[in-house]
Image (tube, helix red, strand yellow):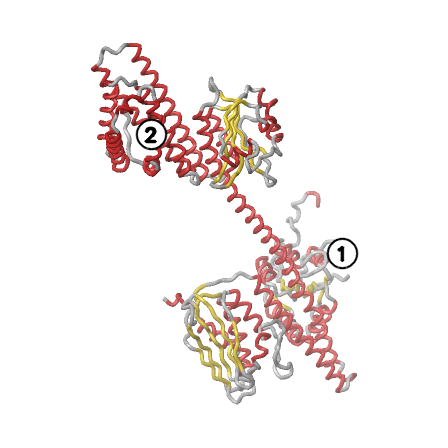
Amino acid sequence: VTDQSVDILLVEDNPDDLQLTLHSFRQANFANTVHVARDGEEALEYLFCTGRHSTRNIGDRPKVVLLDLKLPLVDGLEVLRRMKGDPRTAQLPVVVLTSSREERDLVESYQLGVNSYIVKPVDFEQFATAVSTLGMYWLLLNQQPAAVAVGSPTPAGANPAAG
Amino acid sequence: MTDTLTTSPPLVQFWDVYQRHYAAIGAEVLAEAADHAEFGPVVAAMPPDVSRQQDEYNERLVDDAIRRNHWAPYAAYLRAQGAEYARAGISLASWIDLVASFSEHLRPYLLDAYATAPSELLGSLTGMSRFTNFAIAGIAEGYRDAERELILREERERHRADQAVAQSLERLRSMQLAAEALLDVSRHIEASTDLPTLYGRLSATIADLVQAGCVLFARVQEDGTLAAEPDAYGVSADVVTKLRDVPCDAGGQDLAGRIAHHDLVFRGPLGREDLFAPYDGSLEAFGASTVIAVAWRSGDRRLGILSAYGSRRPNGFTDDDAWVLRVAGLAAGLVWQHKQAEERERAAWRQEQQRVVQLQAVNAELEAFSYTVSHDLRAPLRAIDGFSRILLTEHAGALDDGGRSCLDRVRGGAQQMGRLIDDLLTFSRLGRQALNRRPILPSEIARRALDDLVSEQEGRRVKVDIADLPPCEADPALLELVFVNLLSNALKFTRRRPETLIQVEWYEHPDDPAVTVYAVRDNGVGFDMQYADRLFGVFQRLHRAEDYEGTGVGLAIVQRIVTRHGGRVWAEAAPGQGATVYFTLTGGQARD
């Protein structure tokens, strides 16, 4: 696992959808780096620099998180809840990219503070258009505040044990 | 002493019954008086027509008092009568006996008259007691007048008379209190829902009224035998449980049967009869040696036996106690009636709850199912479509025309299945989601639906006429879905006409002014009416897929929405001559 700076964190368990998404990115000529997490647990480890990603610097934030809802281990809504509930990740834009058009998933996602909710179309052309549009928007058009001091949950030096 | 009275429904109730049975009761009382040591000679000496006239005069006075609240003339008459009898040498005690016997003769008639309405029976008894109290007080007043004149009367005799007055008044007052107490309990029955407590309360009240050590209800079981009810007064639980399988013959072959089914009032020593054998050992412990047992009934329904044991009175249970118990048996019938109604209600409620739980489970299952369908079924379709597309665009060289055509069909199939899934989900969600009903204007909604279908009208000559539709009550989002489906069908099946004509119309319902019939008419290909019944089923299609695309769910959705609004939907058509779909909705009053 290379923990270099990435633009997109793609959380997707379905290998077909994963490949189609990556294919759409390539087709749209996005040269940006994508990190793929295959389940909710891995996504959380990546975001909070624990477990398999404990050496990653939490200050290196992706520009957008593309999040599937139905995921193994920890589901997408839980990942979203943990992200939006933690000051270190609360400002990260999250786009839910899911097959579910159930009202309650939509409602709950927005209640948790999702930035965008996209239903994956069955038609591949529409799907590719959706993926390239959202990439265009979040990677090129959208402006985010410069990295704020979110390096550590406690200010440096506040913890005597760390000294 | 002077009792005052005011006219009230209980007084009128007892008086109604008395007047109905005036002849019979009068004859009974007269017969008793004729046998009386002191009254006998007076009755015998009185010419019959004088006796009758006096009776009629008396009745008129009482009638005037009770029905018109004119008590003073009757009180004066009573006082004069009392003085007259005192002068004739009849003791006040005898007079009181006569009045008491009047009420005893009247009681069975009251019982008959109000047997099916215990609270009215109790009311009429209270009225009768008040009335007799009033009468005796008036007579006693006359005796006192006479006494003042006849100072000769010996001190001792007066003392004896006073004692008799006190005793009789006491007796009458206790009857009045009994009637009032039972009336009070039966009023509680009507007001309260806590019935087990009421049974206990009724038992306790009865025990108090008849001065019994214990009171017990035994109910006729399905097999005809008797078993004790748990809500007893003064009886230990193990005695109650012991009393079951007691024979009770409806034909009256045994004592229990005669009491329960033939209204026998049993009063006597305990243990002589088989019926009370189970109590022997247990009841002796607290000195219960006597018993009264009466029928426990609710109208004509024979519920069992109400019994009281162990009188606390010096000479055991009295006739009055037996009588009070009989009335209590009727009050208990009322309790039972309410308990039954309560239980039926509770059973129905439980059943309803069970159904709700089942329905909730089914709904939750459906929800989980449709969630799975929504999420998991679409993913493989996307893979089929996506990879076919990639194959077509990026590996075209590896395929010939036949291969490409096959892949196009693969993609078409995947996309059609995607639409089917979406439509099915919409359809299933319609059954579950709550209706958001409110007054709406259907014309506006139809116009909005038409605007959504603008792409289907491009490059065509389309004329859509939306009439000024009467308002109704409906869920606006769902009604829009109805119009979207109907208008899109109309646009679809008119595609090959040089000019498309669609009319959205309305009619008054011939039978019900609150119902409006709405219609969407087109000049399209129509269909054969012999297939009309299949039109509204899910996945039912009357045209070939290559001619007119679709999933076959649209009209099923329309039907489900209209049905959920309490309306009806149907269609009329002929091949080549267009089709009209009708549906009904209510709430047209919203126009005002």
**Tags 2 and 1 on a common chain:** no
Q: CA distance from mark 2 to mark 1?
A: 96 Å
Q: Which residue is mark 1?
A: A52
In the structure shown, which secondary structural element does the residue marked by tag 2 occupy? helix
**Quarter of the view holding residue B31:** top left
**Amino acid under label 2?**
Arg
Looking at the image, residue B365 lies above or below residue B394: above
Q: Which is in the foreground here, disc 2 or disc 1?
A: 2
Residue B130's label in the rendered image is: 2
| Residue occupying image coordinates x 47% and y 66% | B474
The C terminus of chain A, quarter of image: top right
Looking at the image, residue B24 lies above or below residue B36: below
Looking at the image, residue B207 lies above or below residue B421: above
| Residue occupying image coordinates x 53% and y 60% | B434
Asked whether B323 or B134 is in front, the reply is B323
Q: Position of residue A61 (x, y in %)?
A: 66, 61
Asked whether B486 or B58 is in front, the reply is B58
> Quick check: B163 left or right of B574?
left
State whether residue A163 appears in this view. Answer: no
| Residue occupying image coordinates x 76% and y 56% | A52
Q: Which chain is indicated by disc 1?
A: A
Asked whether B16 or B237 is in front, the reply is B16
**Amino acid under label 1?**
Arg
Label 2 crowd bin: few (<14), some (14–19), many (20+), radius 10 Å? many
Q: Position of residue B36 (x, y in %)?
A: 34, 22
Whether residues under marks 2 and 1 lie with C-beta atoms below 8 angstroms apart, the answer is no
The N terminus of chain A, quarter of image: bottom right
Q: Position of residue B102 (x, y in %)?
A: 35, 29
> Quick check: B510 left or right of A54?
left
Looking at the image, residue B8 lies above or below residue A46: above
